[in-house]
Image (cartoon, rainbow, N blue to C red):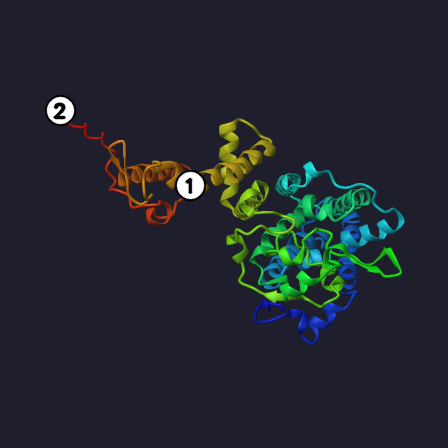
Amino acid sequence: MHVRVESGPLDVLQWPVIGSFLRWRHARTAIQLVLLSAALVVVLDGLLSARIDPTNLATVLTWVHYRGLLVIALLAAGNLFCTGCPFVLVRDAGRRIRPPWLSFPRWLRTKWIGIALFVAVLFSYELFDLWALPRATGYLVLAYFASALVVDLIFSGANFCKYLCPIGQFNFVASTMSPLELRVKDVGTCHSCRTVDCIKGRRAPEAPTVVLQRGCELRLFLPSKVGNMDCTLCLDCVHACPHDNIALAARVPGAELADSRRRSGIGRFSRRSDIAALAVIFTFASLLNAFGMIAPVRGIEAWMSNVMGVTSEAPILAALFIVALVVLPVLLLGGAVASLVFAPPYAESAYEFTSYGYRSQEIYGFAYRSLKRRMGLLGLDIPPADELMPGPIDTDAPMAAPEAAPTAA
């Protein structure tokens, strides 16, 4: 007997027009051709344009319209850019000529290289003002195509997408806040399935080595898939499933971040330090990018130039990146583990306790005021104490020495 699992209030794949299009076998190719055409326009226009032109089609299309549409699509629907990624279309064409012959090394199957490349792209964008350089933008797009082609012509699967692509890492984190996700409709149907086409692909009965429809190249087994992390929304699983048992279903945005279950192809979030670092970099790099667009940043850079005694922008920008992506996360996220740091092991609750003669209110008050002073030096405000600390704090009076324990007469 099958146990029915509700897929949510709606399934986009069942909609009359949009659903029919997405269920069409060539839907992804059609979207990829559109984005490939846009990429070709960016490359040609960029390489044939003046060296510096912030109003050029290549720069405006890439650094203004694309970024805005990307975020809107992620928040409104899901990882639509990865659905229509033109790099994958070129890679698939190359694989018809030269199939991959190696497996991606296990020790490289993390996000660390992708994180480094993501930071490198952001740093280069700020250092070289890529938004005003059409030729550099065109060469960057070509570098993307070349990287995807080289990596995925050597290694089987979608390793460039999952581990290396900076845009992909950005999309994976942002898609955790998307309102839709691919999930199974009926878990019982999956339990009785013997072919597992959603991950292995559907093969020709008369020729088992011939793949008619590939399965998930990112190794996300749908019955154990949780959320959108690492999902490119390629819909290969939808087309491969012989039971029509996969829905593009509505869900609560961000709910997967609080889900501690082990998820297929990823494991547990609590054990993936690389994904945690990616989320932190994603959050603080977004703030840093917005910070770089406001006028006061020029004054701060001039002040840092005088203090550091340098005229080049590179070391100043490097210092800002270190502060924004390392120092601030450490300081702010430290409040999340304050109860583990301050509360002694014997305390029944981090809300109120006594340690070495000091009340918890005094300890929390001292820590909160110290943090507030240090963040004030950077011109930043911190949340109120009742939001940041695990328990109430005392007044602004300095911490007094603990009372001496009474001695026996």
Mark drawn on residue 337: 1
The percent position of residue 59, horizontal first and vertical second, equals 69, 51
Q: Residues within 10 Å of mark 2 (few under 14, many from 20)?
A: few
Question: In the depicted view, which residue is nearer to us: 137 or 25?
Answer: 25
Per the model, the C-alpha gap separating discs 2 and 1 is: 39 Å
State which quarter of the image contains the C terminus. top left
Q: Nearer the viewer, mark 2 or mark 1?
A: 2
Q: Which residue in the rendered view is the most extreme toward the bottom?
A: 16
Type of the residue with mark 1: Val
Residue drawn at (79%, 47%) of the image? 47
Residue 243 seen in the current view = yes
Q: Is residue 293 visible?
A: no
Nearer to the camera, 153 or 222: 222
Whether residue 225 is situated above or below residue 275 in the rendered picture: below
Question: Which residue: 60% across, 61% down?
Answer: 72
In depth, the one of 35 and 76 nearer the eye is 76
Q: Which residue is mark 2?
A: 408
User: Does 394 sit above or below residue 206?
Assistant: above
| Mark 1 neighbour density, 10 Å: few (under 14) some (14–19) many (20 or more) | few
Among the 4 quarters of the image, the one containing residue 130: top right
Give the mark nearer the N terminus: 2 vs 1.
1
In front of the other: 364 or 121? 364
**Residue visible at 13% across and 24% down in the picture:** 408
- Secondary structure, mark 2, is loop
Q: Secondary structure at mark 1?
A: helix
